[in-house]
Image (tube, grey):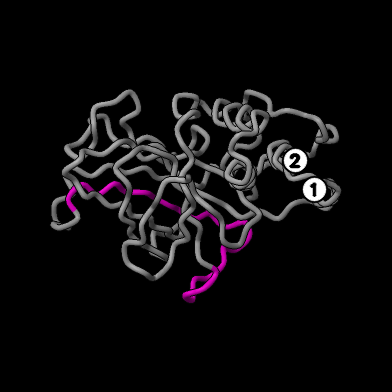
Amino acid sequence: MPATLRALSQPPTSQGLPNSWGAYEPDPNIGKPGRREGGGTRGPCVKNSPNYHLTSLVPANSFGTTLAEYPTFFVYVPSMQEEEKPQLEFALKTENDRVIYKTNFTIARSPGIVSVSLPASANLPRLEENKNYKWSFTLICNPEDPSDRSSNSQVEGSIRRVRLSPTIVQQLEAVTLPRDKVVAYWNAGIWFDALSTLAELRRATPSDPTLEKDWKNLLQSVGLETIASEPLLQPVAASDRKNPNISRNE
């Protein structure tokens, strides 16, 4: 059963992003909702700060749709203790929990929003249309002892690559300006594409106040206003390499 997407109600030009998100409901067969905020405790490798939870950038039900064969996933990583060398693990699974892809990254100690893109190589299959997939980010506090997972924090959710109706496809193809495409994705209920497109625009012009407002409105629309002002880090493309560094966007 495909996700319920809505047609664009009006041309996106000059629109802003509304402050509420309700574009679709997940398939009832998708199972229990994921966890978009990690654990109730701070953990030994995380500094005591207002935003100390590992937090995935998804709607409250941890479900989102995409048009991309190899989509991008976003997660907020809190500030780390100076003496720690934690890692971030990303995993993608089928609906039946078969691991499709898993990779680890060494993370910076400073807080920020990290994005990981699936590689269109390394024999990684593209996401099939109208199939549910599970994903997770795990903050590993003690990577030297893989058996010690007691201090880890994890967020998880589901994603589905959708096939749009001809009407919505035509409306999206009529959009030319990148910012208007963000609004078009928002109106069509395509969370992952709206978020990743807007992130690309913000990285290209980080001082643009309109894009900054759009970013805050988009995160606020799904109840993530507490991390909307956190720095957006440079993207990291997942690969077969071990521990590629995640660095701050300068």
- Amino acid type assigned to the residue bearing label 2 in the image: Ala
Mark yes or no: residue 31 visible: no
Q: Can you tell which quarter of the image residue 36 is in? A: top left
Residue 185 image offset from top left, x and y in percent: 70, 42
Q: Is residue 124 magenta?
A: yes
For the residue marked with disc 1, what is the amino acid? Leu
Query: On the picture, is 49 further left or further right than 94?
Result: left
- Main secondary structure along the magenta-highlighted residues: loop
The correct choice, above or below, for 120 with respect to 106 in the image is below
Foreground of the two, 4 or 215: 215
User: Is 200 placed above or below 24 here?
Assistant: below
* Dot 2 and dot 1 residues touching (CB under 8 Å): yes
Label 2 and label 1: CA atoms lie apart by: 6 Å
Residue at point 56%, 44% (across, down):
64
Q: Residues within 10 Å of mark 2 (few under 14, many from 20)?
A: many
Q: Residue at x 49, y 32 (%)?
A: 60
What element does badge 2 sit on? helix
Q: Quadrant of residue 69?
A: bottom right
Q: Secondary structure at mark 1?
A: helix
- What residue is shown at x 37% (from left), y 34% (from top)? 37
Estimate the x, y position of residue 50 in percent, counting from the top left: 33, 23
Q: Which residue is mark 2?
A: 184
The answer to whether residue 167 is left or right of residue 129 is right
- The image position of residue 215, as x and y in percent, is 59, 32
Q: Which residue is mark 1?
A: 172
Name the N-terminal-most of marks 2 and 1: 1
Residue interval drawn in magenta: 120-142
Q: Which mark is residue 126?
A: none
